[in-house]
Amino acid sequence: MVPKGVLSRYGHLLNLPSHTQPVTLLEGATPLIPVPRLARELAEGMELWVKYEGLNPTGSFKDRGMTAAISEALGRGAKTVICASTGNTAASAAAYAARAGMKCIVLIPQGKVAAGKLAGALAYGAQVIQVEGSFDDALHLVMEITRKHPIALVNSLNPYRIEGQKTAAFEICDDLGSAPDWLCLPVGNAGNITAYWAGFRQYHELKHTGLPRLLGVQAAGAAPLVLGHPVDRPETVATAIRIGRPARGEEALQAAAESGGRIIAVRDEEILRMQRLLAQTEGIWVEPASAAGLAGLAAEIAAGHLRARGQRIVAVCTGHGLKDPDIIRGLPAQPIVLPPRLDSLEEVILRL
Ligand code: AN7
């Protein structure tokens, strides 16, 4: 089979203008991995899968929407694209812009972007600007500047980002044969949950695949959709979702409610515990934000709010663990150092 990106696989289902000129890194077709050992840790009799979006070309789900947004911008003749980002959007925009031969400018909150994401944006040749403020400040700036200058905005306010990101919902239905009972995912700027809901609804109308309930999960220190008001100084270890004014917040709340699901918050400790549990029971290492969906699922099951028995549940793990190596370097378990001697090695091994 010839490898394809999401536009050639699902383009006929996406609302993209005819001037769109495909720019792809063969994103999508990420694995839906059964995680039975983790499932047993959380509840009896539940079927659980991880949609491992960290395996996209730049290491996050953002590539699905970015192939669409950059393809549209290129076809329209844009020379420069811009975005605000907590990191993954920046790396993705930088890569697709490079492939399209366009300039890319990214605004990131100073000191709050994980090392692998900043490195990516620089490696792909973007002009990186650190803003002395939050993601929300950066997003405000790029919205203003794109009103004044002919620069294409590729944040998820761009409708083509949502079109591209719908393809993850299509893939899940194609892999399972129908929609799962629940879809759990992290929520930051709220583009992804909006796109999933649009994708599931479209597929259901077309193929009667059913609809999942959505469990959107924010970090407790950055949970405007749970609190019901913006958060001026969002804080969380999951820097990807350190967002206090989600651009598509209303749509996210509506999607969750329409689906019969909800948006909840989990503490940083729960996120980090789930990151470790997933890596150490299933061999799947994701960045902290990406463990939030599963952490929320675990919390809902433990609180008796979600009966998991007999349910088919998909957790979206949005970004790769390699994006944020510093989190792991801060954990108690670190390498030990030994002289190159057999007796020293034996001593350690016998203690394990
Ligand atoms: C790994 O890159 O907002 O709710 O600027 O990187 O659609 O925002 C990233 C968000 C979840 C939340 N998981 O998705 C950005 C940015 C990871 C992320 C989210 C992000 P949205």
Image (cartoon, rainbow, N blue to C red):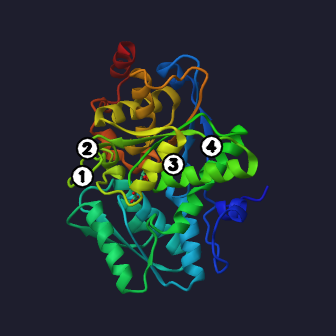
CA gap, disc 3 and disc 4: 10 Å
Residues under numbered marks 3 and 1 in contact, where contact means CB atoms less than 8 Å apart: no
Q: Does the residue tagged 4 have its C-beta within 8 Å of any atom of ligand 1?
A: no
Residues under numbered marks 4 and 2 in contact, where contact means CB atoms less than 8 Å apart: no
User: In the image, what residue type sits under mark 1?
Assistant: Val
Tell me if 268 is positioned left or right of 93 in this view.
left
- Toward the viewer: 23 or 138? 138
Return the mark for residue 231.
Answer: 1
Task: Tell me which numbered mark, 1 or 4, is placed earlier along the sequence.
Answer: 4
Which residue, given by chain and number where applicable, does mark 4 sit on? Answer: 31
- Toward the viewer: 119 or 113? 113
Tell me if 62 is positioned left or right of 240 in this view.
right
Task: Tell me which numbered mark, 4 or 2, is placed earlier along the sequence.
Answer: 4
Label 2, residues with CA under 10 Å away: few <14, some 14-19, many ≥20:
many
User: In the image, what residue type sits under mark 4?
Assistant: Pro
Label 1, residues with CA under 10 Å away: few <14, some 14-19, many ≥20:
some
CA gap, disc 4 and disc 2: 31 Å
Q: Residue at x 24, y 62 (%)?
A: 110
Which residue, given by chain and number where applicable, does mark 3 sit on? Answer: 54
As displayed, is residue 66 above or below residue 233? Answer: below
Label 4, residues with CA under 10 Å away: few <14, some 14-19, many ≥20:
some
Return the mark for residue 221.
Answer: 2
Mark nearest the camera among 3 and 1 is: 1
Task: Tell me which numbered mark, 3 or 1, is placed earlier along the sequence.
Answer: 3
Residue 98 percent coordinates (x, y) = 51, 74
CA gap, disc 2 and disc 1: 8 Å
Return the mark for residue 344.
Answer: none
Position of the N terminus, as image quadrant, is bottom right
